[in-house]
Amino acid sequence: MSTLLLISPEIFLLSPSSTIFAIKDSSLVNASLPPWFLKHLLQYHTSPLIFTMDDLLKKPQGSCFPTLLRPKNVAVTKVGAKERLVEINHVLVSHPDIFIEGNVAIHGVLGPFSSLGSQDFGKIWDSIRAPICDANSSLVLDVSDTKNLVEWTRIVRLLSSNGFVSFAIGLNSVLAGILEDYRGLNSVTIFAPPELAFVASPSPMLDKIVRLHILPQRVTFSQLALLPGKTMLRTLLPNQELEITGDFNITKVLAINGVEIAVPEILSSKKFMVHGISQAFKVAELPTTSR
């Protein structure tokens, strides 16, 4: 960690205050990691806030705080005030208050906050797994529970970079609620409209609109095309289904709730499928029920 700080001194220029969680050498010495990953690892183990050990002991279990690898957070997963024990992402703070001076604090930790094994270094953003936290900095989904689940952070980023900015903003703003209600979700299909006029709507309405555009399983275009007309598709919005309208074998156009799938399979992975649709599904199709 000392070497990483020497070759990346700009880390101290990214924030006026810093708390660094230094990983023990034995956890890094045998790891074959690319340089860019090591830099991200250092950023993920640095918070723009300053915490002494006493500060960490006062934080409630399940609370989150930011890192320099935005928007990824870390979570306090265990606190023992009596034993002066703190775990972050289930990793023990083994050497508290190694260095406290000015606006910098350094603590030693037994290992990395994200597993270094079986990383997919082809996916830079997803190579460091982080817990999911809500807008109140409270833990929603533990880092240990995110391994085989939907890559929501990656989906939001890809939607934004591929022309679905408003839907990406809407999804990101209601994501905490989806994670809370569907903790075991391991695949999804998203029907992404080019524009989402409901981004500025009250959160309950936006939540319903976004959920209506998501199926709780991965479905390819060819699989949808094989389904007969009037087939109902379950969504993340309780008691609200989408309907396949028309017959693809006859019209060669596949529509859901009368809205054409304009760009099939625009984004795809083993855990998600995104189809671009010509417009958002109509709000009028939603009942006035509370979540």
Image (cartoon, rainbow, N blue to C red):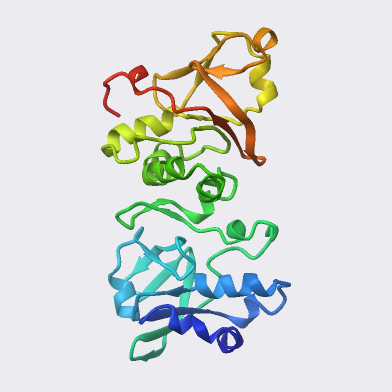
User: Would you identify the image quadrant in which residue 221 lies?
Assistant: top right
Residue at the image point whose x is 33% and y is 58% from the top: 137
User: Would you identify the image quadrant in which residue 49 lies?
Assistant: bottom left
Q: Is residue 43 above or below residue 150?
A: below
Question: Residue 287, percent across and down?
Answer: 31, 18
The answer to whether 136 appears left or right of 268 in the picture is left
Front-lying residue, 41 or 169: 169
The answer to whether 51 appears left or right of 132 in the picture is left
Q: Is residue 280 above or below residue 181?
A: above
Front-lying residue, 24 or 125: 125
Q: Can residue 96 be seen in this view?
A: no
In the rendered image, the quadrant that contains the C terminus is: top left
Front-lying residue, 128 or 169: 169
Question: Residue 217, percent across and down?
Answer: 57, 30
Q: Can residue 203 be seen in this view?
A: yes
In the rendered image, the quadrant that contains the N terminus is: bottom right
